[in-house]
Image (cartoon, grey):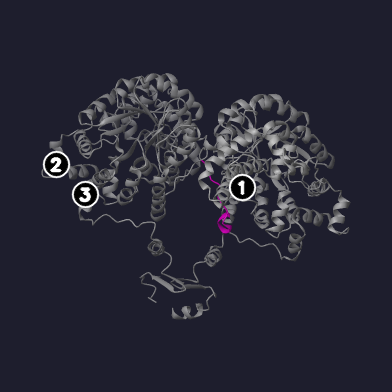
Amino acid sequence: MSDVTFVDTTLRDGNQSLWAYNMRTAAMLEAIEGMDRAGFESMEFFSATMIKKYVREHKENPWHWIREGTRRARNTGLRMHGSIRGGLEKKPTAVAKLVVSHLVENGIRLTRNSNPWNDYSVFKQEVDDLRELGMDAVANIIYSVSPRHTDEYYAQKAREAAALKPWRICFKDVGGMLTPERTRTLVPIVLENIGDTPVEFHAHCNNGLAPLNYLEAIKLGMTTIHTSIPPLANGSAQPSIFNMLRNVRAMGHTVNVDEEALKPVREHFTFVAKRDGLPVGEPRAFDQSVYSHQVPGGMISNFVHQLRLVGMEDKLPAALEEAARVREEWGYPIMVTPLSQFVGTQAAINVIMGERYKQVTDQSIQYALGIWGRQGAEYMDPEVKDRILARPRAKAWENWEQPDPSLKEVRARLGASLSDEELIMRVYAGDEAVDALQNAGRPREYLSASQPLVRLINELTRQQEYTQVYIRKPGFSLTLGKESPTAGAS
Amino acid sequence: MSDVTFVDTTLRDGNQSLWAFNMKTAAMLESIERMDRAGFESMEFFTATMFKKYVREHKENPWHWLREGARRARNTPLRLHGGIKGGLEKKPTSVARLVVQHVIDSGITLTRTSNPWNDYSVFKEDVEALREVGMNCVVNLIYSVSPRHTDEYYAQKAREAAALKPWRICFKDVGGLLTPERTRTLVPLVLDNIGDVPVEFHAHCNNGLAPINYLEAIELGMTTIHTSVPPLANGSAQPSIFNMLRNVRAMGHTASVDEEVLKPVQEHFTFVAKRDGLPMGAPAAFDQSVYAHQVPGGMIANFRHQLGLVGMLDKLPAALEEAARVRAEWGYPIMVTPLSQFVGTQAAINIIMGERYKQVTDQSIQYAHGIWGREGAELMDPDVKDRILGRPRAKDWEGWQQPDPSLPEVRTQLGSSSMSDEELILRVFAGDEAVEELQNAGRPREYLSASQPLVRLVNELTKQQEYTQVYIRKPGFSLTLGRSADGEAAEDTAAL
């Protein structure tokens, strides 16, 4: 039986999908040595998206994580996630390249990236540029469900991806929509069309089926899979490493990951979840309804919010139906950020206005002009495209190009004497946040789960409702009081 | 597109699979009127297993539940679970029949029953005996995984089940082992072989796949499914009614269950779970390992415990492998209670002794004799059967028959000819001592409602064993809870 190998996603995709990057640097640093000893093939470690979140909200310097984290992970290859211009959050190419160079300097030589259209002509430049900077690329093939995303589509896309000669291809189920049946038809198509390019499988658990889909894929010969450590597994993240180890062993495969090394890591993150009020990833029951409209869960709650603001909460089913219709008219984009937002927002506007495309967003215009991918403009229903573009505002975006200043120009704007690291943070997080970071103290140290009394006191003092907590045991008493203008000290 | 109908399992299978029947009568009574208005085709309501648990542990009279519950559910037919002699917990047939008659007196005229071997020749008598006293029967066809449980096996069993002309057949995935793929091959086979007997589908969620299996089955024409109200859904119980309603509607089917009516029921049981420390059913991730040995989760925990006692915890994987081997040698019984226990216990003994079948349990001997089903004796590997039966103890069980006293004999045994039927049944199922305690116990506990947070807070705080005193103060409000254990509490309160 073939050996199954594992790519760990805990610190990047788990952290992003389940905790919206609310895992603090100290919590990551405390875990990474244990993870590094477990026997993963590689670990997702960093994404440029983290720069803004960590600087602005956590007041933590991501370069500290990059330096300290890489220093502590000596056995396992670490991965960046994303690329230079493949992503849709448009930063100057020169700065994005600088990020990659600095990661390479810290020993990170592998990244995985997507194009939301699976457009490998755009990707080619990307893979070449990354290679030049010393970074290998894992090229994603994203799974989607629509009349356009046929077997033939995936055979063609697999051939195009392989033609780039990437370090590896990753078959990616971003919406957690694959079923065991579709896995059985699609995996062989991918494998047959990628030649000798190695392949891995990255799936989200939204529909609860990813663990089973992995097993089907392994049977068919796709034997490198992405997993996460609970409580950062399941939910909308990857399957649990513990579940998958048990499952692949039960199928007779051999594996080199040591779950004993990972149990303290799970305990640590469970403690962090409780301490910081972060969600614990749980398996989900199958949900057929996502296949009709494919609007992600987070967006549905946003729909409800928007509709409530205008007193049209009862229009939610209509808005979801409209989203399915808009997606169809727009040529079935894969429902990933930001395309899913563009589709959803336009659908909500259509329902709220009571007339379709009476008002359109700037993003709808940009989409119709091909700014968010040439396929968007090509596949869009011509009549819808005419409706969107037949307004004065559309002229403003025609032939618009994203400004792409050189490094020199960026420096000239932000300060000639800035270090590369500071310049990158200023571009991604903004001046104000970087100034605030520089004035902030040391990053917060983490308590360990083995200090229950300290934890109890912290938890109790967080309760807003009580001004005082008094606990007494034989030989022990504890009083906690909150200073408050209305309650005297006792 | 079909109209999908729903059998609710909350009060029986949900209560049993997830809460081990720890849902008190008051908690059931508080929810049943709402459940009754939701539009279920029927609701699982009672099983004779509840007698022992409710009398012995809850000190509650199950006849109170039968009368009051049945009175409050005026719209939805209620169901008994289990037959007269179909079950393997052997009680006198005369008493089991009396139970059925009294359940019928409460207006319940439908039951669902299994034979762990899918042995419809045994079943026939049960179905007829039930029909005779006025009880209709849903006959289970249990799914299992083994080289013996082939398409041909299920085609044959489906025909045999249909030949009994039951009220309905129920395709039952007791271990939650079905996959969407197997559902697609097996459901058409069942439908093709049962003629015009109606069918329903009852699945457990152990492997997380039951919700998608239901959808596959509905596409294939099996449109009555069993669901439960969370938190008594998922886990090792049935899929959630909310999940299935959303799913079947998304597929374009119609369903006339009203989830708005059920939301307060979900809230109520969530409150009960928190209050009584009972588990919340949650979806489980797919687990391939159960297919290898098919030992239920509860039994694995028991294995661990037994092996730990003899310092052989490292032998757990070996014990699970041995269970798979024993099951094969015994002719692949379906891994349901009590057969799964017999297989598991013998496997654990084989590992602990270091020699296979050196020691055997009485149940292993009985199994080999066919006492737990004629197929057990027929399908067992002859060498293994010889090893088990080639010892003096086996002679004791040869030709043994379960005594089956008549009702007058039972009355004589219990020493009272004037005892009411209801009391007689309680004494047979729960024992004299427990029934006497019940008679001396007070009213059943009333339930607090979730809308009384302060009362709940106080209750929860006083449950904490570690603290002798809890003092809470807010502007205009202070609260001190003291435990009088060490006599110092009063003094401290004064110190504040």
Which residue is located at x 73 percent, y 60 percent?
B434
Q: Residues within 10 Å of mark 3 (few under 14, many from 20)?
A: many
User: How many numbered discs, if any?
Assistant: 3
Q: Quadrant of residue B148?
A: top right
Span shown in magenta: B273-284
Which residue is denoted by mark 3 in the rendering? A434
- What type is the residue that disc 2 sits on? Arg
Work out which quarter of the rendered image holds the C terminus of chain B and state it: bottom left
| Badge 2 and badge 3 both on one subunit | yes
Given contact means CB atoms under 8 Å apart, are the residues at marks 2 and 1 in contact? Answer: no
From mark 2 to mark 3, how far is it between C-alphas? 15 Å
Q: Which mark is residue B261?
A: 1
| Residue B480, percent from left and from top | 50, 73
| Magenta-colored segment: predominant secondary structure | loop
Q: Residues within 10 Å of mark 2 (few under 14, many from 20)?
A: few
In this rendering, which labeled residue sits more in front, label 2 or label 3? 3
Lateral position of residue B323 relative to residue B79, left or right = left
From mark 3 to mark 1, how far is it between C-alphas? 53 Å
Q: Chain of mark 3?
A: A
Q: Please, which residue is most extreme toward the left here?
A: A416
Nearer to me, B427 or B203 = B427
State the SS at label 1. Answer: helix
Lateral position of residue B492 relative to residue B361, left or right = left
